[in-house]
Image: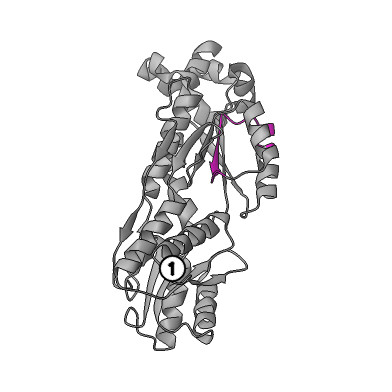
Amino acid sequence: MATIAQLAGVTQPTVSRAFNHPEMLQPETLERIMQAVNQTGYVPNMVARSLASSRTRLLAAIVPMLSNVVYSSFLKPFTARMREAGYQTMLFESGFSLQEEERLVEMAIARRPDGILLTGATHSETCRRHLRSAAIPVAEVWDLADDPIDLCVGFSHDESARHAARYLIGKGHCRFAVISANDERAYRRREAFSQTLAAAGLELPRRVDLPSSASIGQGKAAFGALLESGFDQGAIFCSSDIIAHGVLIEAARRAVDVPGRIAVMGFGDQDFAAEIMPPLTSVQIDRQRLGEEAARLLLARIEGREATPARIDIGFGIIARDTA
């Protein structure tokens, strides 16, 4: 900074103001300083700045899969809003494992981020204890917690599945199947879907629980297994659009009429859902709003402002298309 000040013909505190409060400087002064910065390749020491201000300007976001568009689509508006406010986001991938999430939370806390974003409301007791004792603002997203750690933005997975079941019953279906990825929230939706059928006096659905996360290949294999088990007519509720896409591909390969013989409903309403043939009926979640609300609440908490409401239900909807 002393070198920058000498080259720009200003004092060292003026250089500091150029980085921290550029609006306080005359445009020509700021331009001279930035020219000196470009000439030398100087980069401010953020570690030193964080020690002085007790702010790292870093956030930690932990999601099950970075490659899954369900999570990346709410991370995008979240990180964009935080970047506008001067924060950068460290991304961690837990792989749907509570033990891995616990390890990543410990790793994140050790770096003292200004805030933490978590996916879901189910965590190990050790993880919850670490987060509460760290006194770092936390936003849980993609689920609604009855007892949130701090802030929560999500929707009811149970109610979304009940709504899906009632929709398919209303379309006249009497036989059902559920294909679920290896995910705690998907299993909760499966159980709520089944309970709704039972309450309506219908037989419980055929179940296919996948051994891993969702994929087109898993969807194809699951549909094949359902056909081989005798399920050749009815409605299939899939825990993700990716699985439903696989079902539709396999149905087309086997010349199974959709929705004539088999109706298919996905979950998440991903961008491709409206473009595939036939267009996929799906449960829609406003992931853009989810990311924006999480960023708004977390920023308010970090900056000492009131974060209200601390628990936001963004809801869901059924987008009816040709498959159901």
Name the spot of residue 314 as percent of width and height, x first: 37, 44
Pick the quarter of the image with the N terminus: top right
Of 187 and 129, which appears nearest the observer?
187
Examine the rendered structure and indicate whether residue 95 appears above or below residue 53.
below
Q: Secondary structure at mark 1?
A: strand
Of 230 and 294, which appears nearest the observer?
230
Q: Is residue 93 magenta?
A: no
- Occupied quadrant, residue 275: bottom left
Of 30 and 79, which appears nearest the observer?
79
Pick the quarter of the image with the C terminus: bottom left
Name the spot of residue 49 as percent of width and height, x first: 60, 21
Name the spot of residue 40 as percent of width and height, x first: 56, 29
Q: Is residue 116 magenta?
A: yes
The residue to which callout 1 is attached is 237
Name the spot of residue 266 as percent of width and height, x first: 41, 65
The amino acid type of the residue labelled 1 equals Phe
User: From where the camera sits, is residue 65 visible?
Assistant: no
| Magenta stretch bounds | 106-121
Examine the rendered structure and indicate whether residue 228 appears above or below residue 154.
below
Examine the rendered structure and indicate whether residue 180 appears above or below residue 185.
below
Q: Residue at x 66, y 49 (%)?
A: 98
